[in-house]
Image (cartoon, coloured by chain):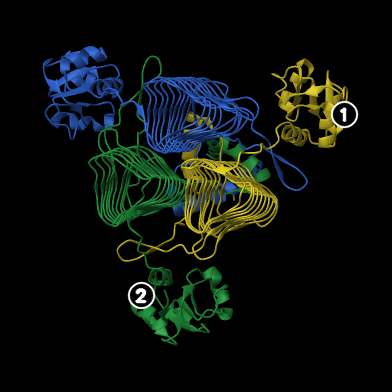
Chain colours: A yellow, B green, C blue
Amino acid sequence: MSATLGELAKYADVTLKGNADCIIHTVNTLKKAKSGEISFLSNRRYASLLSTTEASAVILSEQDSDNCPVSCLVSDNPYLTYAKVTNYLYPRQALSSGISDSAIIGKDCTIANDVYIESGVVIGDGVTIGSDCYIAAGSVIKDGVSLGEQVQVNANVTLCDDVTIGNNVILHPGVVIGADGFGLAQDETGWLKIPQLGSVIIHDDVEIGANTTIDRGAIEDTVIQSGVKIDNQVQVGHNVIIGKNTVIAGCTALAGSCVIGERCIIGGACAISGHIEIADNVTITGMSAVSNSIKSAGLYSSGIPVTENRIWLRNITRFKHLDETFKKILNKLD
Amino acid sequence: MSATLGELAKYADVTLKGNADCIIHTVNTLKKAKSGEISFLSNRRYASLLSTTEASAVILSEQDSDNCPVSCLVSDNPYLTYAKVTNYLYPRQALSSGISDSAIIGKDCTIANDVYIESGVVIGDGVTIGSDCYIAAGSVIKDGVSLGEQVQVNANVTLCDDVTIGNNVILHPGVVIGADGFGLAQDETGWLKIPQLGSVIIHDDVEIGANTTIDRGAIEDTVIQSGVKIDNQVQVGHNVIIGKNTVIAGCTALAGSCVIGERCIIGGACAISGHIEIADNVTITGMSAVSNSIKSAGLYSSGIPVTENRIWLRNITRFKHLDETFKKILNKLD
Amino acid sequence: MSATLGELAKYADVTLKGNADCIIHTVNTLKKAKSGEISFLSNRRYASLLSTTEASAVILSEQDSDNCPVSCLVSDNPYLTYAKVTNYLYPRQALSSGISDSAIIGKDCTIANDVYIESGVVIGDGVTIGSDCYIAAGSVIKDGVSLGEQVQVNANVTLCDDVTIGNNVILHPGVVIGADGFGLAQDETGWLKIPQLGSVIIHDDVEIGANTTIDRGAIEDTVIQSGVKIDNQVQVGHNVIIGKNTVIAGCTALAGSCVIGERCIIGGACAISGHIEIADNVTITGMSAVSNSIKSAGLYSSGIPVTENRIWLRNITRFKHLDETFKKILNKLD
C-alpha cells in the first residue's frame, strides 16, 4: 500500500522535515530509489550517496539531516524506522483460508476455522492448529503437534511428534523440529541409541530459518524462548535452552544441553559446546568457538581472518610450536 | 512400559542395591525425578544433586553408591546402563503396516508385506523395500533404491537413484542421500560437470541426522560402514568412506574421497579435507580443521576458543605477523 | 553408450597413442578398471598404479605417457579430458515428458509442452516453466516463479515466490531458494522483522547442491551469475552477489550483502562476512574466515590444522596471551 510521508512519520513516531503530503509507494536503496520511494541511511559506508539520491524522502539521523537534499524522517535509529516504515507499507497479507482437498489430515485433530492448509500437506493424529495458521505445501506435521495462532509453516517443513509451537512463529522452508537428539552410549560392540523422550517447545514470536534443525530433548525438552530469531542452517542440539530475544546467525551449531542467555547476539558459523552456559547480553562474533561458559555480558570473539596463503603457511607452522618457541625465548630472556 | 528395579538390573546386567520390587515407570533427571522414576549420575557436575533426588532409584558408579539415599543400580558405566534401561522402558513400537492410498509406487518394486508407507510418499521404479520398514510422509525414493529390513525413513527424506541402504538404518527428516558429488573440471570458459556414476552404500545399524547430505560417488561408491552414527547437517562428499562404528557430530564437513577409520569420534563443526586418511580410533574435538592424514590413534584438536573481543583483536594482529615477529626475536637472541 | 578410443580422442580433441578401434564402455579408476574401460591419471598420488592398470586405455599427460602400458589419450589437462570423455559416454538422458496426475498446478501458469513433472509436486499461480524442465517429486514451486529451459529441480526443493531461474540450472534435493533474508531491527522490546521485498535471480548454467539455501533480498535481489557452481549445505544470505563461474564448496556461509567476484574458488566450511567484497580470481582455502574485503586476486587462507590435543592445549593457552607475551618479550629486547 502507499502512504503519505506524514502518515509514516506518525506511525514510526519520528520527526518529519519537508513535505508531509508526499506520497510514498515503496522503500528502496539510496542509489536506486526514484520519485515516490523512501530510502534510508543507517550504515555510514553509504553516506556519500545521500547528496545524489533521487528518493522522495530519506530516513536518517539528526546529524545527517542537514545534508539531505529531499524530505526526511529524522530518527535516533534510522534502521528501526526503516523497518517500521517497511512494515507499514507492506502489512502482513490476509491469507485465503481453507484446507486443500489433497491435504491429508489425521484423526482427532483440532483445527481452527480460518487456517490455510495447502496441497500435499500431511498432518498426523491429535494435532492442534490455532487460528490464522498457514501450512505450506510439502510440510509434514506428525502426531500430537500443537501450533498456536498465526503460525506460518512454510514449504517442506517437518514437525516431529508432540512438538509445541507458540503464537506468531515463522518456520522457513526445510526446517526440521523435533528429530531425535544425538544420544548414544558406547557399549562393547558399538553405540547404543538412547530413546529421546523429551520434545521441543517453541515460544511466541520466534522465527526459524530455512533448513535449520532443532532436536528433541533426551529427557526434558529443548526450549526456544519467546522472541528468539534463528537464521538458516543453524543446528540446535537436544536440551538446548535459548533465552528470550536472542538472535543466532546462519550455520551456527549449538551442541546439546548448552544454555544461551537472553538478548544474546551470536554470529554466523559459530560452534557452541555442549553443557555450557552463556550469560545474558553476550555478543559473539562470527566463526567463533565457545568451549567454556561465558559468565558475563560483553563482546567475545575467536577465529583468525585470512591472510595471503604464503604468510598463513608460515604462521601456522609457528603456531604448531607456539608454546615450545615461547618457552625457549622466555628461558633465554630470564 | 513399566518394570521392577529387579527386572531392570537383570536386563542391564548390573548390581542392585535396595528394593528389587520397586516399580519404575520412566527415567528422569536427578533434579526432576519423582517417585516411580529412575535417574542416573554419569556426569560429575551433577553429583551434588544426588543427596536430594526424589527418584525411586538411581543408576551410578560403585564410588557414588554409598552416598545414594535411595535404591540404586551400580554400574561400571552408568551412562550405558541408563541407555539400556531407557531402551527397556521404551521398546521400539510396532508400527501399523500398510501403504497409504495417496502414496505413489512405481513399477517393478519389491515391497515386503509388513512395511508402513505414509501419505504423500513417492517411490520410483524398481525399488526394493525390506520387511518392517517405515517410510514417512513427504519422502521421495527414486528408481532402483534398495532398503534392507527395519529401515526408518523419516519425513521429507530424499534417496536418489540406486542408493543401497542396509538393515536397521534410521534416516532423520530432510536427509538427502545420493545427490551428485561436486565434480567439476575447469575448461576454457568455466566448469564442466562430471557425471557422477557411483552411488551410496549405507551398511547396517547406521543412523543419519536431520538435513545431513551424503553425495554419490564419481566413479566408485560413497560408503558408510555398519554402526556409523552421523548427527544433523553433516556433509559427506563423494567417495568418502567412513569406517565401522565411527560417530560424527553435527555440522561437520567431510570433503570428497577422504577415508575415515573405524571407531573414530569426530566432534561437531569440523572440516576434514579431501583425499586424506584418518586412522582408526582417532578422536577429533569440535571445530577442528584436518588438512592432512592422521596416521595414529589419539586425541587431536585445533580451533581457538573465544576471548573478550578487545584481547582477540590484539592477538589476531600478532598472529598475522607471527612468523615475522618470531624471526625477529630469535635473530636478536642468537 | 560405448565409443571407440578414436571417437573419444576426436571428441575431446586430444592425441591418441595406441589402438583407435578399441571399444570403451565406461570409465573407472586405475585400480579397478578392466578391459573395455578407460581410466585417467591426473593426481600424482595415484601415479604408481599406472604400470599395473588393467584399463584398455588411460587419459594422462605427455610426461606420463611413456610409462603407460596400454593405449592412451594424451592431454594437457587429463582431468578435463576425463570429464569430457565421461560426458560423451554418459550423455544427458532424454527424460519422459508429461505431468503426473497427482501434481498440483496453480492458475495462470505457462508450462512448456515437453516438461516432466513428477507426482506430489505442488506449483503455485502464475508460474512459468520452460522447455525440457524436470521437476522431481516433493518439490514446491510458489507463485510467480519462473524457470528457463532445461532446468532440473530435484526432489523436495522449495522455490519461494517470484524466484527467477535461468536456463540449464540444476537444483539438487532439499535446496531452498528465496526464503526470507535474516532482516531484523532491534527495538525496545526485541526484534522487528523487516519484510524482505527483493527476490533471487539465478542465471544460466548454475548448479546448486543439496540442502543449500539462498535467501531473497531485503530490497534488491540476491543474484547468482552464470556458471556458478555451489556445493551442498552452503548458506547464501540476502543480497549476496556471486560473480560468473565462481565455485563454492560445501558448508560455506556467505553473510548478507557480500559481493563475490568472478572465477573465485572458495573452499568448504568457510565464512564470509557481510557487506564485504571479494575480487575476481580469488581462491580461498577451506575453513577460512574472511572478515574484510579482498581486493586483489590470489590465494588466501586462515584456520589452524589439528595437532595432538596436548600440544594444542598449550598453544591455545599461549594464543590467549599472544599480544601480552610478545609485548613483554619485545620490551625486554629493546
Identify the secondary structure beneath mark 2.
helix
Looking at the picture, does residue A120 appear above or below residue A21? below
Q: Which residue is mark 2?
A: B12
The quarter holding residue C95 reads top left
> Disc 1, disc 2: CB below 8 Å?
no
Q: Badge 2: how crowded within 10 Å, few (<14), some, or many (20+)?
A: some
Q: Which label belongs to residue C182?
A: none
Relative to A161, C39 lies left or right: left
Disc 1 residue type (three-letter) = Leu
- Mark 1 → mark 2, Cα distance in angstroms: 74 Å
- Quarter of the picture holding the C terminus of chain C: top right
Query: Viewer-proximal residue, A230 or A6?
Result: A6
Disc 2 residue type (three-letter) = Ala
Residue B8, position as x, y percentages in the image: 38, 78
Q: Which residue is mark 1?
A: A16
Which residue is located at x 32 percent, y 54 percent? Answer: B98
Looking at the picture, does residue B176 appear above or below residue C85? below
Query: Viewer-proximal residue, A19 or B101?
Result: B101
- Quarter of the picture holding the N terminus of chain C: top left
Residue C276, position as x, y percentages in the image: 61, 28
Tell if the residue under mark 1 belongs to the same chain as the one under mark 2: no
Looking at the picture, does residue C17 appear above or below residue B27? above
Relative to C198, C172 lies left or right: left
Residue C79, position as x, y percentages in the image: 29, 23
Q: Can residue B206 be seen by looking at this rendering?
A: no
Identify the secondary structure beneath mark 1.
strand
Query: Viewer-proximal residue, C174 or C139?
Result: C139
**How many labels were placed on the picture?**
2
The quarter holding residue C328 reads top right
Which residue is located at x 66 percent, y 57 percent? Answer: A295
Q: Can residue B176 be seen by looking at this rendering?
A: yes
